[in-house]
Amino acid sequence: MSAWIGPAIVAALIGCLTTMLGWSVSYRQLRNLELVKRKEKIVDYQTALRAEIRSYRARFEYMNPIAYRDAIIALIETDPSFTPFLPLETPLLIFSEIAKEIHILPTEVIDTVVLFYAQAAMIVQLTMDLRSEDFHDLARDRKAGLYQDYYSVLLYTRKLADEALDRLENGLNNPA
């Protein structure tokens, strides 16, 4: 029996074992590289989202939205021809670019970020409605009510932005 286990068979077995070990090491290195790239992508996405939400949130830093809202509503109520001008909302581009891969972010980050962006999208639509001729033609009590609602939505979105920023900061400071 030992006659057929010659040097060629031993060499073939050692070659097979070496090849299998090489595959295993290569697989582990590739897997580790993929994990490193995934973690980098998570950090990059959270950093980009944080920057976009911070820029959105920065609009509220230098204004008192409640005082402004009250002043505009007073103008609407006193002058029937007055229609406030609302600037168009700036598009939030980063979220739309990474939305297809948002699943790689931590669950608690996804929840608050998606909630914020859904609310921001609603503000875009509401702004378009408040810029329309239909709004311009409404009675002043309806205009005042809609404008009041608009500012309530803005204030709620500011709160959601703060929550999303907190979660993003936490995610960046405590990576998984």
Image (spheres, grey):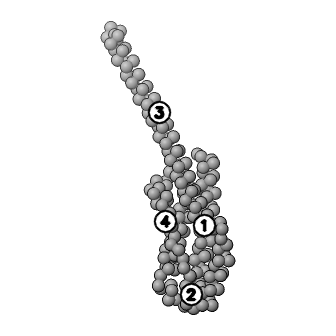
Secondary element under disc 2, as helix, strand or loop, is: loop
Q: Are marks 2 and 4 in contact (CB under 8 Å)?
A: no
Residue at the spot 55% in from the left edge and 85% down from the top edge: 83
Seen in the picture, residue 164 relative to 21 is either above or below; the reply is below
- Tell me if 128 is positioned left or right of 55 in this view: left
Q: Are marks 2 and 1 in contact (CB under 8 Å)?
A: no
**Residue 1, visible in the rendered structure:** no
Quote the CA–CA distance across marks 3 and 1: 46 Å
Task: Name which of mark 2 and mark 1 comes first in the sequence.
Answer: 1
Q: Nearer the viewer, mark 2 or mark 3?
A: 2
Quote the CA–CA distance across marks 2 and 1: 24 Å
Secondary element under disc 4, as helix, strand or loop, is: loop
The quadrant holding residue 111 is bottom right
Question: Residue 84 at what x, y percent from top left?
Answer: 56, 82
Quote the CA–CA distance across marks 1 and 4: 14 Å
Q: Nearer the viewer, mark 4 or mark 3?
A: 4
Secondary element under disc 3, as helix, strand or loop, is: helix
Question: Residue 151 at what x, y percent from top left?
Answer: 60, 76
Task: Name which of mark 3 and mark 1 comes first in the sequence.
Answer: 3
Mark 3, residue position? 29
Question: Residue 56 at what x, y percent from top left?
Answer: 57, 64
Please name the amino acid that badge 2 sits on: Phe
- Tell me if 49 is positioned left or right of 101 in this view: right
Residue at the spot 60% in from the left edge and 49% down from the top edge: 172
Please name the amino acid that badge 4 sits on: Pro
Please name the amino acid that badge 3 sits on: Gln
Task: Name which of mark 2 and mark 4 comes first in the sequence.
Answer: 2
Residue 82, numbered label? 2
Residue at the spot 63% in from the left edge and 57% down from the top edge: 166
Residue at the spot 48% in from the left edge and 76% down from the top edge: 128
Mark 4, residue position? 91
| Crowding at mark 4 (Cα within 10 Å: few <14, some 14-19, many 20+) | few
